[in-house]
Amino acid sequence: MEKMNQALEKMKMLVGMDVEDEEVAPQQESFMDDLNRNCTLSTKQRLYGFAICLTTGIACTLLSMLVFFNPIKFGITFSFGNLLALGSTAFLIGPKRQATMMLDPVRIYATAIYIASIIIALFCALYVRNKLLTLLSIILEFGALIWYSLSYVPFARSMVSKVMLACFDTEF
């Protein structure tokens, strides 16, 4: 029976569920623990939230192509679409696990660059109102999105880096 309980606890840990330790003394709860506890949703509600956020995010990103020649409007809709798509995964795995995965040492730099590029793009579009800077920041944001997405695929970033080095190698 003990082995069965241990196997069940390991399975819970693999899928990201909390394992109840009866011997552990109560600890002070963090903000994220409190947020997770208050944001409990059923599986159906999680899937609906994910689908709505992801669909809206993709729609905003695709609709931004209609205003491509107006970089300010393009920057706003493209960045808003990226934020919605990024936030959609929090419905599936929860905000705490989403934050810990984004702040994982493997992808901390990709996350920081991606979020910073979204902020820079919105800043250039809303406050600076410079079309060239907005367009350059959107290109940076798109590159950061790809690099961030590749951080979730094992060995993808190293493979892309090697391909890029091979394509742009100037030594003969």
Image (cartoon, rainbow, N blue to C red):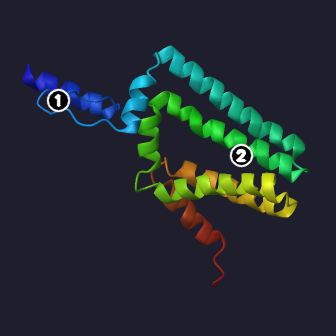
Q: Give the residue type that dot 1 points to.
A: Asp
151 over 161 or under it: above or below: above
The residue lying toward the viewer, choosing from 127 and 99, is 127
The total number of labels drawn is 2
The residue lying toward the viewer, choosing from 144 and 166, is 144
Dot 2 alpha-carbon crowd within 10 angstroms: few under 14, some 14 to 19, many 20 or more: many
The kind of secondary structure element at disc 2 is helix
Q: Report the residue at 71% width, 41% height from top.
A: 80
Q: Report the residue at 56% width, 52% height from top.
A: 148
Q: Position of residue 16 (x, y in %)?
A: 35, 32
With 98 as the anchor, is 168 left or right in this view? right
Location of the N terminus by quadrant is top left
Q: In the rendered structure, which disc, 1 or 2, sits on the residue that comes first in sequence?
A: 1
Cα–Cα span, label 1 and label 2: 42 Å
The residue lying toward the viewer, choosing from 150 and 51, is 51
148 over 90 or under it: above or below: below
171 over 44 or under it: above or below: below
Q: Report the residue at 61% width, 24% height from top.
A: 51
Q: Position of residue 7 (x, y in %)?
A: 18, 27
The kind of secondary structure element at disc 1 is loop
Residue, disc 1: 21
Q: Are marks 1 and 2 in contact (CB under 8 Å)?
A: no
Residue that extends furthest to the front in the rendered view of this protein: 28
Location of the C terminus by quadrant is bottom right
Residue, disc 2: 79
Checking the image for residue 45, the label placed there is none
Q: Report the residue at 58% width, 59% height from top.
A: 113
With 48 as the anchor, is 60 left or right in this view? right
Residue that extends furthest to the right in the rendered view of this protein: 69
Residue that extends furthest to the bottom in the rendered view of this protein: 172
Q: Give the residue type that dot 2 points to.
A: Ser
